[in-house]
Amino acid sequence: MNDREWDAYNSSMPEAAPGTIRQAVAALLQRWARRLHATPEAPRINEAELRSLITANTGSGHVREVMVPRTEVVFLDAQLTLPEAIALVRRARHSRFPVIAGDPDDVLGFVHVRDLTLLPFPDPAVPLRQLTREVHRLPASKRVLAALSEMRRGGHHLAVVVDEYGGTAGIVTLEDLIEELVGEIHDEYDPPPPPAGRVDEVDGLLNLADLAERTGLTLPTGPYETVAGFVMARLGKLPTVGDEVRHDGWHLHVRTVEGRRAARVAVARPVPPPRSPALDHAPGREKTE
């Protein structure tokens, strides 16, 4: 990607700005309006009532289910020079990057891609640390709706997710939380589940709740939160391409592997057994024309 292409990409980089939130809220309200059969003449629902409705049906998941895990995060070391950091962010194609002091558990803050790309002449002697902004932190156990409210009030677009031991579990963006919240609401306009025998390919990092929503497969709870975690637990070893596990007639086939985890997993729905011809000629069954 040359400088002109990068500038064009950078200028079109989506922000978790008011427009994003307005679109999400609009989608949310439209779905609730359809669910409640609201009309312009119907009594208005005030903000408190709407919040109660939404809270009762969404946002019950935890931040750890929505976050990007640390193994998938692009961290920038605080000692990088600005030209080195610019080279890395151009390859990563994200908008915000956590800055660390040598270890992902020691996050100093974050930088926005524009902090780097808008510098006309980056000084090679200046370390990335000098451009680092303060970053918000959220516990992995926090509820999605509460996390969204907290980030919105503070004007935060990125947060570091902290596990129970105080280490870095991953990161989460405002967009992640909004998408999770809006995506949890279902109504009669949602598409029907895919037919039996269909094969869906999913990301290994897909959490179990989203897997059930997307495919209809409900996996048992255990010491894992993702499809890749379930596959590894069932295999009892690190996955390799071609590995397969089964659950209640479903087949989960490892398509690709990244590092030590299943990156893409094919999920095949159970196929009902064919009807036995003997049933059509069972005693007492009359043949109809």
Image (cartoon, rainbow, N blue to C red):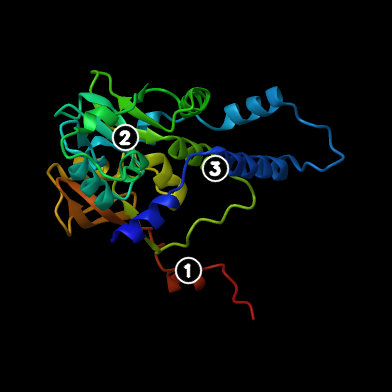
Reading the image, the residue beneath label 1 is 279
Between label 1 and label 3, give the one nearer the viewer: 3
How many angstroms separate mark 2 from mark 3 (CA)? Answer: 21 Å
Residue 228 visible at all: yes
Task: Look at mark 3 in the image and give the residue it sits on.
Answer: 20
Looking at the rendered image, the quarter that the C terminus falls into is: bottom right
Q: Which numbered marker is on residue 248?
A: none
**What's under tag 2, amino acid-wise?**
Val
Q: Which residue is more in the foreground, 74 or 165?
A: 74
> Which circle, 2 or 3, is nearer the viewer?
2
Answer with mark 1 or mark 2, whichever residue precedes in sequence.
2
Query: What residue is pinned by disc 2?
Result: 111
User: Which image quadrant is residue 66 in?
Assistant: top left
Label whose residue precedes the other's in the sequence (1 or 3):
3
**Which element is circle 2 on?**
strand
Disc 3 is placed on an element classified as helix
Quadrant holding the N terminus: bottom left
Closest to the observer, 282 or 147: 147
- Taking the spot 20% from the left edge, 44% from the top edge, the residue there is 83
Q: Earlier in the sequence, mark 2 or mark 3?
A: 3
> Residue flagged by tag 3: what amino acid is it?
Thr
| C-alpha distance separating marks 1 and 3 | 57 Å
Structural crowding at the residue carrying mark 1, measured as other residues with C-alpha within 10 Å and reported as few (<14), some (14–19) or many (≥20): few
Provide residue 13's location: percent of width, then percent of height: 43, 49
Residue 267: in sight, yes or no?
no
